Amino acid sequence: MRVVLDTSVLITGLRSSSGAAAEILRLVLLRKLTILMDYKLACEYRDVALRVEHLIVSGKTQEEVTLLLDMLEAIAEPILVVDRHSPLSEDANDDMVLEVAINGSADAILTNNAKHFREAAIRFQLQLLKPAELLKEFRIRR
């Protein structure tokens, strides 16, 4: 399954090792899910994940988070965003996620806040899933 992670899912997975978002990250690292990413989205992930407040809550060092991000970038399918449809939402960061999903023909966008993506998802026939919903679907497919 080809997915794009909303930054909130990445951060939730980093901050808590026991939730659905953390399990999504494990599945990506095991290459059971394919994440799609472009350079701008990778920069967004780094910018947010390396904020002091997230490091403190996660109990991880900057080096540990950087290593995880390096691994995610190394196994992500790189997407070249050529077809731009912006603005698609009220938030430019949400537009980045949508543009990668559209240009990469993603199966789903994983997000904790579907309302930010709903209109564009309907327009471009993109599935919106919370991490727990994807895990349920993933288990059914196996």
Image: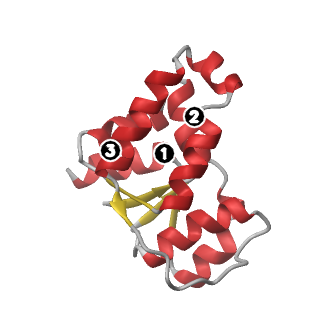
Q: Is residue 117 left or right of residue 6?
A: right
Residue hosting label 3: 28
Determine the secondary structure under disc 3. helix
> In the rendered structure, which disc, 1 or 3, sits on the residue that comes first in sequence?
3
Residue type, label 2 = Thr
| Pair 2/1: label in front | 2
* CA distance for labels 1 and 3: 12 Å
Disc sitting over residue 12 in the figure: 2
* CA distance for labels 3 and 2: 15 Å
Q: Nearer the viewer, residue 73 or 135?
A: 73
Q: Residue at x 29, y 50 (%)?
A: 75
Q: In the rendered structure, are the residues bearing label 2 and label 1 in contact, judged by CB atoms less than 8 Å apart?
A: yes
Residue hosting label 1: 131
Residue type, label 1 = Pro
Q: Residue at x 66, y 62 (%)?
A: 94
State which quarter of the image contains the N terminus. bottom left
